[in-house]
Amino acid sequence: MNFAELPLVASPIALVDQDVVNEAIQKCMADKNLDNPRLIRESMNAVYLVQSSDGPQVMRVSRPTSSTMAAIEFAHYLARNGFEVPAPLSHAPFRHDEIEITFWEFINHDPHHDVDWRHIGSVARRLHDLDPQIVATFYPLPMATSFPWWDFDRLLAELGSSLDSSDLDVLKSRWHRLQPFFISAQNVYSSPISGQMALCHGDIHPGNVIVNRLTGRPILIDWDLLSVAPREWDHAALLTWTQRWGGHATIYPEFATGYGTNYSGNELAEALAEMRLLSATLMRWRAGLTSPDAKIEAENRMRYWRQDPTAPMWRAV
């Protein structure tokens, strides 16, 4: 199959000219006769809660590499295949300059309800059993390693002057040890150590799961990192969630039970998990060059790589 060179959304919305973003939001709100958008989440997209005559809706603001009609079509595709996802309310995106805005079903999240991680594991398994070549006919499907935060050589070169030489040496050493597995993930067809290629969500962790207050069912959200990768890719984040992010120790075992395979101790999965930690450290370090709060968190993350036994848990800030 032919991979897309870029994902549907290739850079965080915070990196876009905020005057352009705000103008797009204002024009869209006027066009739809809406007001008072409330920001509830910001990552690759800015996500707002808005009130319409039909009730609350979720508004997603993006700078896509191609039309966000692909996201609408993918949501319909998932629903047809039995996945519970927020339904698109837009027939087409609202466009202004380089910004596209879509509207989605609001699902009332119950943050106090325990997540059924076995169910999320079964969702991941069913996703991996779908044919990525079908999805690639209507959605720009990249290789997982094409996202910019996996370009370790560039990140290390960019940030090297701001790191202590000993810290830079530690990070470079870790990257060189992980590099064969990174290459494996890039060459999912030919590498002898690569796992089975699959359609991957790309970012399965507690922050991307909500619980429907009406039904109690957990729903996997935030599909911005949809890609093709070894199946291990969707296990990597949860493999270290307890040790580094302070998550409950049962999360990954329950997820693996629902999935049907436990990748703890799997060489490729463990390497991909460490790659995620390395990327999270470098991206936080870069943010820390302009944000004092991010700088504090980046320093805390570096203590882990220095093998400091008192290194604190990481915070997703």
Image (tube, helix red, strand yellow):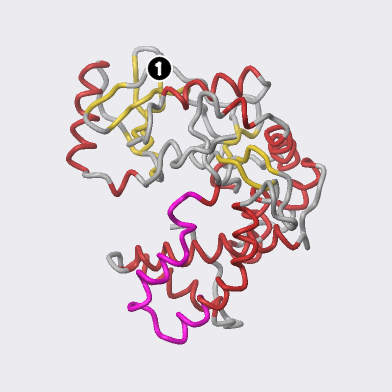
Q: Is residue 276 left or right of residue 117?
A: left
Residue drawn at 32 percent across, 28 percent down: 100
Q: Amino acid at mark 1?
A: Ser
In magenta, the rendered stretch is 146-171
310 or 201: nearer the viewer: 201
The answer to whether residue 55 is left or right of residue 246 is left
Question: Magenta stretch containing residue 170, yes or no?
Answer: yes
Element under label 1?
loop
Q: Quadrant of residue 18?
A: top left
Residue 228, horizontal then vertical, whole percent: 60, 41
Decide which of 302, 152 is in the foreground and name it: 152
Give x and y (percent) for residue 103.
39, 23
The answer to which of 127 and 60 lies nearer the viewer is 127
Image position of 301 with respect to 254: above or below: below
- Report how many numbered discs are placed on residues in the image: 1
Position of 305 compared to 43: left or right?
right
Q: Residue at x 61, y 20 (%)?
A: 79
Counting other residues with Cα less than 10 Å from the Cα at mark 1, is it few (<14), some (14-19), or many (20 or more)? Answer: some
Majority secondary structure in the magenta region: helix
Residue on which the image places disc 1: 90
Q: Is residue 223 above or below residue 280?
A: above
Magenta stretch contains residue 86: no
Left or right, residue 183 beside residue 296 = right
The residue that appears at 37% across and 28% down in the rendered structure is: 59
Which quarter of the image is occupied by the N terminus? top right
Q: Residue furthest front?
A: 190
Check the image and report above or below for 69 versus 119.
above
Please provide percent x and percent y for residue 39. Answer: 34, 38
Q: Quadrant of residue 160?
A: bottom left
Which residue is most to the bottom? 166
